Image: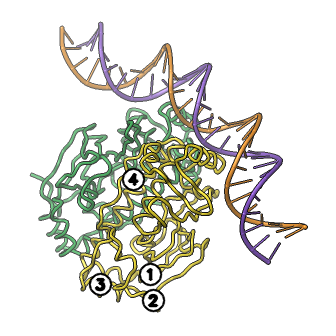
Chain colours: A green, B yellow, C orange, D purple
Amino acid sequence: MTVSCDKCPLRSRRIFKNLTDRELDFMKSFKMGELQVDAGAAVIMEGSKSPHFFTVLSGVGIRDKTLPDGRRQITNFVFPGDLVGLQAGLLGEMKHGVEATSDMVFCVFQRERIWDLFKNHPSRAYDVTWLAATEVRSISDSLLSVGRRTARERTARMFTYLMRRAQESGFASSENSMPFPFRQLQLADAIGVSLVHTNKMIQSLRRDGLIELEDGILTVPDLEALHEVALSDEEPDDPGRPLL
Amino acid sequence: MTVSCDKCPLRSRRIFKNLTDRELDFMKSFKMGELQVDAGAAVIMEGSKSPHFFTVLSGVGIRDKTLPDGRRQITNFVFPGDLVGLQAGLLGEMKHGVEATSDMVFCVFQRERIWDLFKNHPSRAYDVTWLAATEVRSISDSLLSVGRRTARERTARMFTYLMRRAQESGFASSENSMPFPFRQLQLADAIGVSLVHTNKMIQSLRRDGLIELEDGILTVPDLEALHEVALSDEEPDDPGRPLL
DNA sequence: CGGAGGATTGAGAATCTTCAATAAACGTGG
DNA sequence: CCACGTTTATTGAAGATTCTCAATCCTCCG
């Protein structure tokens, strides 16, 4: 059987907000199942109109958009606790795709019940909006990065971002390291740099001892130092992130 | 006195959704005033915690973020009907600034009453979320552009985007032209290209007859052609955009 | 008339891309 | 456990786009 919301392994993490009993009851009824996908699978296709939307229960992935000629931009990474597919629920159609980068498990919700949520559970509706606003912030940060940072700065910033998200969501494997199931091509498509140049920037950060990346594990010995290379201001979220 | 919501000049435009009488009554009480600013003024500062948020009643502006060393990225343009400052209302602090680029007028709402909106007016709460989701989509489009399009393609795409927004919001002055109160430095900061190179790309589009830009008026004789240069898929929004 | 901000243009320099080749890692079947 | 095809990572080098520097021009405004 599927994980019951009141035993949700994510909810006990410090970063996530606690729910009232009433909210929890609602979430249990709201959740209609689980979806499991293998690494590499497309979870949502750009342009699709799925009747479902999801919360990531475990694993990581990416969101992406493509140009007519195939050039691709990864717009964000997806970590446990993230809401996925809301766009289809609200706007009718997904304007980006979602792809699993590791094995993933999702909680599945029905698109049609979103109105029920707004009508009868304003606190949860507020939380959905909070998540959307946070998404805006996150993508804006990436836009600043791609638009105005140098390739090396972007690369550094991406690693600090991934480390922070991994730590907050519990995906990290220790204080300063995390499983790293991403290809360099994906990293390149995320920071708007060619694959070859991305590789060179990674080598450069390695040589300077700012990151270690081997056997699918990323280690950042000194996060503060990496932040400085990235010219990054971005701070960790306070506890209180909602989890649907 | 200020404009009453039931006489709102924006609401009659085709693109915007109609409200029920009850919703309209609520909006009238929700609106607490108007804010007028001159072209060039900062409306919201990055990092601020304003007790208000706004809907643009007239005029246009930009949203921007800056790096510690001053490099700036314009993350989006602001047109009539756009909601501004919601981030502070939901997340506590604005992570980007907003600057008026023409004279502007805003409807002013109180941050504290946002909870009232979620609790008692679910349809309006839904609309707020819809707007946030649309913002995500819009910024993602820009991220794709900055990350993966060439300078010329980006420039073309920016003009198609601005034309579409101007037409939908009523800011356009005719079928294929609009007031254009933007400096080339701002355009450069929006597309992630240097000022000098932005100028060269604009000249290039001009030479090819794709845009005309003089006396503060932008004219796009053949929007379809410009879309092709931009490799752009982006479609106009359907009528039904909510207006707060 | 003089000054300021904005637009435009040319030219050399730099970053980044593309091409090309090699090496390493991984999975599959024998 | 090894051979082999495939994907991914790495590196060098030439070429292109884009950036920075610098100068000129233009318009607006007091």
Q: Secondary structure at mark 1?
A: strand
Query: How far apart in space, not on screen, are marks 1 and 4 (Cα)?
Result: 36 Å
Which numbered marker is on residue B2? 2
The reply to whether discs 1 and 3 touch (Cβ–Cβ < 8 Å) is no
Provide the residue designation for mark 4.
A165
> Callout 2: residue from which chain?
B
In this view, the mark in front (1 or 4): 1
Depicted B6 relative to depicted A233: above or below? below
Inspect the image, locate mark 2, and give the three-letter code of the amino acid beneath it.
Thr
Residue indicated by mark 3: B24
Badge 4 and badge 3 both on one subunit: no
Q: Amino acid at mark 4?
A: Arg
| Amino acid at the residue labelled 3 | Leu
Give me the chain letter of mark 1. Answer: B
Q: Secondary structure at mark 4?
A: helix
Q: Is residue B126 left or right of residue B220?
A: left
Mark 3: give few (<14), some (14-19) or many (20+) Cα within 10 Å.
Answer: some
Q: Position of residue A211 (x, y in %)?
A: 50, 40
Q: Chain of mark 4?
A: A
Front-most of B120 and A77?
A: B120
**Which residue is at the front of the view, B128 or A6?**
B128
Residue at position x 11%, y 65% from top? Answer: A29
> Going by the image, does C10 lie left or right of A236?
right
- Spatial CA span between label 4 and label 2: 45 Å
Q: Which residue is mark 1?
A: B107
Q: In terms of sequence position, does the residue under pointer 1 or pointer 3 come before the other? A: 3
Mark 1 → mark 3, Cα distance in angstroms = 14 Å
Q: Amino acid at mark 1?
A: Cys
In this view, the residue in front, C21 or A33, is: C21
- Is residue B243 positioned above or below A114 on the image? below
**Residue at figure coordinates x 37%, y 85% from the top left:** B7
Which one is in front in this view, the residue at disc 4 or the one at disc 2? 2
